Amino acid sequence: MRFIRLIIIVLIIVFFAIIYTQNLEVFTHSFQLQMDLNQYMVGPYITKNIVLILSAFVLGVVVALIFGALQSISAGSDSRQKSRRIKELEAQLAEQSNSPQSGGGDVASAPPSDESGSSPFTPPS
């Protein structure tokens, strides 16, 4: 939903930028774009600088959306992993509280194993 809202905002900004810059003389200069690759030549294309400005803006928005989507995917994966770990720890705690305590053993004496190494919740050695 966030991305759809962002895309709508970008389209509105582009629309107003086109309306604003359409008749200003500063933005109506023409440029010739071409690329010579020795074997193949791309262009020449005649374009106005407003097209260059708006295409750079849209390209920046697309790059930002891609990075935002990748970050969102990463955060969702991290959240699912932490949620799964919480459920495991809750199950272990429930199992320890339901089992009879033999010899007055301490519940915290056998901390759950952690994949990442040390945990701030384990007692010091």
Image (tube, grey):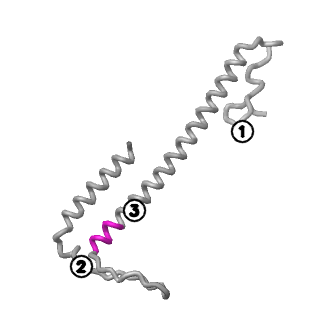
Query: Badge 2: few (under 14), some or many (20 or more) residues near its Cα, within 10 Å?
Result: few
Q: Residue at x 71, y 31 (%)?
A: 122
Whether residue 104 is situated above or below residue 20 in the rendered picture: above
Let me know if residue 78 is in the magenta part. no
Q: In the rendering, at what x and y percent does residue 57 appear? A: 35, 64
* Residue at 48%, 55% in the rendered image: 67
Residue matched to label 3: 60
Which amino acid lies under the numbered mark 2 shown in the image of this protein?
His
Amino acid type, label 1: Glu
Residue sitting nearer the eye, 39 or 97 = 39
View extreme (left): residue: 23
Q: Which of the 4 image quarters holds residue 53?
A: bottom left
The residue where tag 1 is placed is: 115
State which quarter of the image contains the N terminus: top left
**Magenta span of residues:** 49-55
Contact (CB < 8 A) between labels 3 and 2? no
Residue type of the residue flagged with mark 3: Gly
Can you give x and y, in whole percent of width and height, for residue 90 in the image?
64, 24
Location of residue 32 (image quadrant): bottom left
Q: Is residue 9 above or below residue 112?
A: below
Query: In this figure, which residue is indicated by the disc labeled 2?
Result: 29
The residue lying at 18 percent from left, 75 percent from top is 25
How far separated are the C-alphas under marks 1 and 2? 61 Å
> Where in the figure is residue 52, as x and y percent of width and height?
32, 72
